[in-house]
Image (cartoon, rainbow, N blue to C red):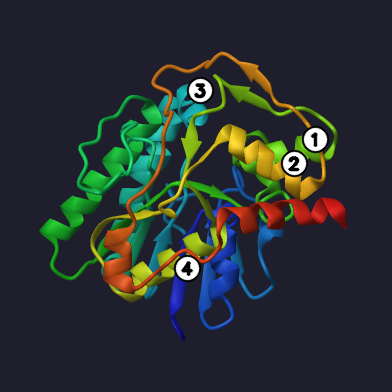
Amino acid sequence: MDDSRVLITGGAGFIGSTLANRLAADNDVIAIDDRSLGTPENLDPGVEFLDRSVLEDDWPAEVDVAFHLAALSSRAMLENRPREGTRVNVEGMVNVIERTREHAEAIVVAGTSSMYDDKPPSRETDSVEAATCYEASMLARDRYMEYYNNFYEDVHVASTRFSSVYQGYGGNEAHKGEYANTVSQWAEKMADGRRPVLWGDGTQTRDYVHVSDVVRAMEAVANARLEGAYNVGTGRNFSFNETVALLNDALGTDIEPEYEPVQLRNYNYQQRFDISKLREATGWEPTVPFEEGVERVCRPYAE
């Protein structure tokens, strides 16, 4: 993507700021964020930052491409604030599309993988259901995506369903704290000599995808003017026990995890994506194997 005017909502957050910084070298990038989950300190000087909410109407909408990442992005956030979360996640998306669709050639929306069942590999054609308020709001985003693609001929809206995105506190993930990916949280604890807490017996799995691969995928979806839902993962999964072992290797530690009972209803135990749809549509491939990604997460602790 070159010489485009780009809007990124949630642009000071973890994924949003990584995308903004990547695109700013060759594009005019505007990042809007209400600072509830992001910080402008994540952004490079070449990115224009605006302290705005996606529920407002006073931000630039005449853009070539819009990436909509603003959301209350976890189960806990929605269960604690269901009305606010639903407004941001659903009404906010509709507002972004309505304000940009007459100008933008492509609109790419952040989706979720949590509505898939425990029978990997998960495919975009799998039946999905909402077992939590977060999943209900994100599934609604996909339904609105379908509406806009089916009703309007001149708009291209795609949903990118992320698996378990990570980077580490040495990147732009630090501000998320307790909402950061477990890889980053466990690395921080283990580097400090503390034991990570694993729910159940640690055999549950995640398809960990590095944020650098995620933003490449979103750019590829926008460039191809795709419509519909696309999985963004790696096609590999690792158990929590395996993850802790990799962290021990990278940190040079020998820390045993603590195990506690699973504390959530409708907990997702197994995760692995089929990423063939995105690969076939764009040629995109993940480039950071999880073993290398863990090394990157842990490297700052050795410096």
Cβ–Cβ below 8 Å for labels 1 and 4?
A: no
Q: Does the image show residue 60?
A: no
Residue type marked 1: Asp
User: Gap in Å between the C-alphas at discs 4 and 2?
Assistant: 29 Å
Q: Nearer the viewer, mark 3 or mark 2?
A: 2
The label number, if any, that marks residue 254 in the structure image: 1
* N-term-proximal mark, 3 vs 4: 3
Q: Position of residue 114 (x, y in %)?
A: 39, 36
| Circle 4: element type | helix
Which image quarter: residue 127?
A: top left
Q: Nearer the viewer, mark 3 or mark 1?
A: 1
Cβ–Cβ below 8 Å for labels 3 and 4?
A: no
Q: Is residue 102 left or right of residue 58?
A: left
Residue type marked 4: Arg
Q: Position of residue 280 (x, y in %)?
A: 27, 68
* N-term-proximal mark, 3 vs 1: 3
Q: Is residue 177 left or right of residue 127?
A: right
Identity of the residue furthest to the bottom in this view: 3
- Tell me what residue is drawn at x 45 percent, y 49 percent: 236
Name the residue nearer the viewer: 22 or 155. 22
Which image quarter: residue 11?
A: bottom right
Residue indicated by mark 2 = 248
* N-term-proximal mark, 2 vs 1: 2
Q: Nearer the viewer, mark 3 or mark 4?
A: 4
Q: Nearer the viewer, mark 1 or mark 4?
A: 1
